Every structure is written in C-alpha cells, then in structure tokens.
Image (cartoon, rainbow, N blue to C red):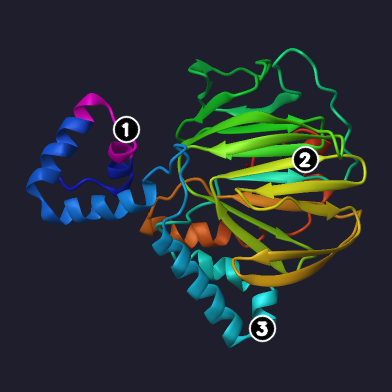
Amino acid sequence: MRHPSDRQLIRYLTGLAGRRGRTETARHLASCDACAGRAESLNVILRPSENNALKPSARIQRALLAALAAEKEVSGKEYASGSPIKAAFRFKPALAAAAAVIVISGTVFVHYAVKQHRTLPVTVSYLRGSVYINGTRIKKESPIYQDSFIRVTKNAALVLTFHNSLTIRIRGESLFRIHRSGKNQKHSLMGYVFEIRKGTLFASVAAGRKGPYFCYLTPSVSIQSHKSDFMLKVGDSDTTVIPREGSLQATALGSKIEMELRPEKKYIITSSIEPFNLDKEDEKNTDSMKNIGTPMDDADDPSAGAPRERI
C-alpha cells in the first residue's frame, strides 16, 4: 500500500473506513514509522472527549491563544478588523474549510410552542447529493426529528430552515446531531442544539463589515430565541444575550471586545467541521473565509427565497 493521505488516515482513525481500508491502513502503519507519526498527530486532534463529542486539544487551544495575542500586539486596529480569524486558520490541522454556516436572520423569531411529538420545525430547503438521517437517505419532504443524527457525504450539501428565520448549511463529509434543548421558563425561549460529532467547531460573529469579531472553539452551539433578542450558548460557556440593537460584550479566547448591533443587520455564525490538512486547498480555504462574519443581504439569505447554488 502506498502512503495514505490525511483524509484516509482520518477515516481510519474515526472508524469511517471500510473493512479493506482498515486492514490495509493498519498493516501500513505497522511498517511505516513516518505514517504512524502522522496518524498519532491527527489522533491528537480527533480524540473524543468524555461525551464522545470532539473538541480541540490543549495544544491547539494554546497555539490559537498565542496567535491571537501576537496579532493583537502587532496591531490592535488590525485585530479588531478580523485578523484573529486569519491567525486561527494558520493552524490548518484544527481548522479547515468552513463546513457549516448557521445564519441568524434579522427577522423576528416566532415562538415555537412545545408539542408532544418529537418532530422539529425544520424543513429541507436545499439538498444536493447523498445525505442520511438516522441511516435513511433524506428527501426534500423528509421530517427532521429530535435527536436525529445527520450525515452529509462527500460532495453533498444540505440546507435546513427553521421558520424561515434560522438557517443552517452543511457541506460534505459532516456528521452531527440536532436536538431541542427544551423550554426556558424564565425567558420563554425555545432552543436548538447542533452537536458536532466529527471534527472541530469554529464559531465567529461580526458586527458590520469591518467590525470586531469574537471566536470560539467548541464541540457544540445552541441558539435560543424570542421576539426581542437571541440567546447564544457556545459549548459550556455562559449564555450570551444578543439584543436586536444596542451593544454586546463578549470574551474571545481571553480577549474582551464590544460590538454595536443594529436590528436591520443579519449576524452570521460560521462553523468548521472538517479538521483535514489539505495543502492543495489552503488558498481556496482562505479565500472562502474572506466574507465570513459580515452581515448578509436578503439576496444571499436562503430563508428569503430559494437557496443559491453556492452553498
């Protein structure tokens, strides 16, 4: 067997390789020290946490913190304009091409009453290629149930829409679970949780086209909503209130920032699921992230009409 690629090693380490692939890769790793070292480095990133969700290693988190601190020291103005994202993406084993985009639209959320059945108020607004929900191939009319596992295969794409207000886009080779977090009696909120089961989740939010960002590395994101504001909870962090207007204070990997919010804008949360280190795609990955974290126009919002092809 020739030397396996990073993608083949990741499939082997995550149990996604077929029987023949597992056998051939295991035999090769036993006889090739170089590939065994590569596999161990990848395994540091892919090793599951206690709840079987993937999260970045301490080494990667330290590297990101150092990169963000260096960027801020070089130029505070450059840091505020979005440089932390560029810094974070220098660590390609942890963060690669954006694989999912959760879009918080500027329209008012409609409160979803708790019902006895487990079907979520989610519709499939775009589907390309093979996508499976709980092992069954999904169709445009397929219902999405609570605690569903969704697998998006290579070269496939999926767009899910919640009440035409919250949209999540998922690209190829992704695996995640979606469930309802329950009702918050204090705020009368309904929440949805997107739990990443394959890869590392990277999230960022920006205010304005050149406004400040705040970033997270975490295995899950949950969104809660009611008429006046959004509630964002990232991983095990405290819930952050995102008002329709006013200012928001947040902590970005140790750096505190403040952003101004306006009700007519739409704020974007981006998530990277694939931790692949594909050198040939580095330039493409960087270019694909240039517009991340900027307000959307209605023409770019799938919830405002049929989704465009550029998923």
Q: Is residue 180 above or below residue 212?
A: above
What crowding class fits label 2: few (fewer than 14 Cα within 10 Å), some (14-19), or many (20 or more)? many
Residue plotted at (69% across, 52% down) = 238
Please give left or right for residue 104 compared with residue 152 in the image: right
What crowding class fits label 3: few (fewer than 14 Cα within 10 Å), some (14-19), or many (20 or more)? few
Name the kind of residue labelled 3 in the image.
Answer: Gly
Q: Toward which corner of the image does residue 158 lie, by quadrant?
A: top right
Name the one closer to the observer, 176 or 252. 252
Q: Is residue 200 above or below residue 124?
A: below
Farthest front residue in view: 186
Q: CA distance from mark 1 to mark 2?
A: 33 Å
Nearer to us: label 1 or label 2: 2
- Tell me the residue that label 2 is attached to: 224
Query: Which dot marks residue 190?
Result: none
Under circle 3, the secondary element is helix
Sequence order check, earlier mark of 1 and 2: 1
Query: Which dot marks residue 76?
Result: 3
Name the kind of residue labelled 1 in the image.
Answer: Gly
Farthest bottom residue in view: 74
Query: Which dot marks residue 15?
Result: 1
Quadrant that contains the C terminus: top right
Residue plotted at (52% across, 19% down) = 134
Under circle 2, the secondary element is strand
Under circle 1, the secondary element is loop
Q: Toward which corner of the image does residue 13 lie, by quadrant?
A: top left
Q: Which residues are magenta?
A: 11-21
Residue 308 seen in render: no
